[in-house]
Image (cartoon, helix red, strand yellow):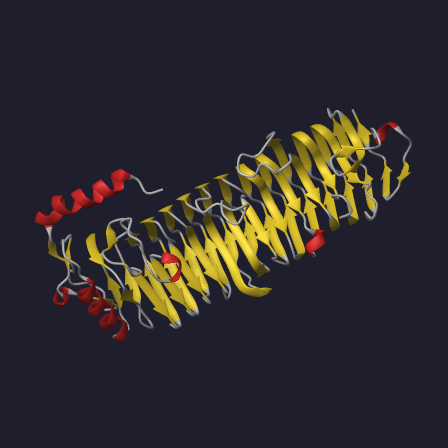
């Protein structure tokens, strides 16, 4: 969130550095980099320099040259990046500070665009346009953002619409809405970025209509994501996917999210693998509503209100594999969503649950089906420890077939139970001979 000291720092910084103002550009030794002594820019000046910088951007792009900005603060707003623009700063020291109400940088319809090593500082100002972003790009085929810092804005950090390319090694901090919002992407890669102190969602990958997207979200560090604008899950997530298919979410470190570390609503063929998710306020990994196809594998979840949910068969949610995950330390309740019940893994339709390890759940370790919403589920070769009920399978009228076999269930009050919603209606089935109970077939499970 935006804090008073940042506004004080901004106000004092201008006065303290005014005496150090100097011409912004020195002659570059590289013929491929534009020199800008003649553009009239002055580092750390207290007046708006949008016009001068826009001229420098346009001229360097026309010449096919990169434009280098040296260290210093520049008050600007509403800069347009033309086709072929390349804007390069001095890492951590070149700061474009919002002086108006338009995005600091925006681009539309450019084939290639490169911005690197800049700080985009919103100065706490409300910005108009698409989701109030510091940088917006629309219809850019190959955008390349590297080493850019987005900070101090009540809106979004970065908004991309209909773009491909990559956002790499960038930082999003003290952003009031979404860190990065991508709509209708075309092969976007979001890799190796850091997100912290985000108001609503760190990374949002959405589509206007349900369809293949193909965005890759990898190797990012995400922490302290709130739900400023409320709701029951549309905010408060590390990664938020909506209608976007074939999205890969892999090898991210995600912690302290108000709702989910990773949440996919209506995204088919989503792959969620090898993520570390700690302290989620609701369900750590949530695959929900009208999806077909999901792979959730080799993730580690620690301290969440619930672990992994593959749900909403009633809305068409089906077809998944949940394999090799470690889920532990489930809390007794959710402070974000009081309706959340504690469980380790919950699935409903056309799903395999194989080789997972679930420990310390004050509820059901692995929940197979919910009421009548159960069809064709296999749960096998899992280890469940220290849960109220190790594995619970819905036996409600209308529930479909399930097989529970070859699991080890240790330290649970009840190892395997048939359930009607939240109620155990069979006692512990591991105490009976292997066989069938209504729609459930169970065999070779070991309790102790």
Q: Is residue 182 left or right of residue 88?
A: right
Image quarter where the N terminus lies is top left
Residue 283 is situated, as x and y percent measured from the top left of the image, at 59, 41
Q: Residue at x 65, y 51 (%)?
A: 295
Q: Measured from the top left, where is residue 144 in percent x and y?
A: 39, 62
- In the rendered image, the vertical position of residue 323 relative to residue 330, given as above or below: below
- Which residue in the rendered view is the most extreme toward the left? 19
Q: Position of residue 448 (x, y in %)?
A: 78, 24
Residue 29, image x, y percentages: 20, 63
Identify the residue at image location x=75%, y=24%: 413
Q: In the rendered image, is residue 317 in sight? A: no
Q: Nearer the viewer, residue 203 or 316?
A: 316
**172 vs 141: above or below:** above
Snapshot quadrant of residue 429: top right
Does 93 sit left or right of 327 as displayed? left
User: For the image shown, how many numbered marks are present on the structure?
Assistant: 0
Q: Residue at x 27, y 72 (%)?
A: 61
């Amino acid at each position: 969130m935006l804090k008073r000291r940042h506004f004080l720092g901004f106000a004092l910084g201008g006065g303290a550095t005014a005496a150090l103002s100097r011409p912004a550009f020195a002659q570059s030794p590289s013929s491929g980099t534009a020199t800008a002594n003649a553009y009239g820019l002055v580092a750390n000046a207290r007046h708006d320099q949008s016009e001068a910088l826009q001229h420098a951007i346009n001229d360097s792009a026309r010449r096919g040259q990169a434009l280098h900005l040296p260290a210093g603060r520049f008050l600007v707003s509403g800069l347009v990046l033309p086709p072929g623009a390349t804007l390069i700063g001095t890492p951590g020291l070149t700061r474009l500070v919002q002086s108006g109400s338009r995005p600091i940088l925006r681009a539309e319809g450019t084939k290639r665009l490169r911005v690197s090593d800049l700080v985009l500082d919103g100065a706490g100002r409300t910005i108009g346009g698409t989701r109030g972003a510091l940088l917006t790009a629309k219809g850019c085929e190959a955008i390349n953002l590297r080493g850019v810092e987005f900070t101090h804005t009540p809106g979004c950090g970065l908004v991309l619409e209909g773009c491909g390319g990559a956002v790499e090694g960038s930082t999003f901090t003290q952003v009031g809405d979404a860190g990065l919002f991508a709509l209708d992407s075309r092969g976007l890669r979001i890799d190796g970025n850091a997100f912290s102190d985000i108001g609503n969602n760190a990374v949002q990958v959405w589509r206007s209509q349900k369809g293949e997207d193909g965005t890759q979200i990898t190797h990012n560090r995400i922490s302290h994501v709130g739900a400023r604008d409320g709701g029951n899950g549309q905010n408060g997530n590390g990664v938020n996917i909506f209608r976007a298919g074939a999205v890969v979410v892999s090898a991210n470190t995600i912690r302290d999210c108000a709702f989910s570390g990773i949440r996919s609503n209506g995204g088919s063929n989503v792959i969620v693998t090898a993520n570390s998710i700690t302290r989620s306020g609701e369900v750590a990994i949530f695959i929900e509503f009208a999806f077909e196809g999901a792979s959730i594998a080799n993730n580690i979840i620690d301290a969440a209100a619930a672990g992994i949910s593959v749900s909403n068969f009633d809305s068409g949610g089906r077809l998944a594999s949940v394999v090799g995950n470690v889920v532990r330390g489930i809390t007794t309740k959710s402070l974000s969503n009081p309706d959340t019940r504690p469980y380790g893994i919950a699935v409903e339709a056309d799903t395999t649950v194989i080789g997972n390890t679930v420990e310390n759940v004050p509820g059901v370790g692995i929940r197979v089906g919910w009421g009548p919403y159960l069809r064709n589920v296999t749960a096998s070769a899992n280890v469940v420890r220290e849960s109220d009920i190790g594995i619970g399978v819905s036996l409600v009228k209308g529930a479909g077939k399930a097989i529970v076999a070859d699991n080890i269930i240790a330290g649970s009050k009840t190892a395997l139970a048939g359930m009607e919603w939240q109620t155990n209606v069979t006692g512990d089935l591991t105490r009976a001979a292997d066989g069938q109970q209504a729609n459930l077939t169970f065999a070779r499970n070991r309790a102790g």
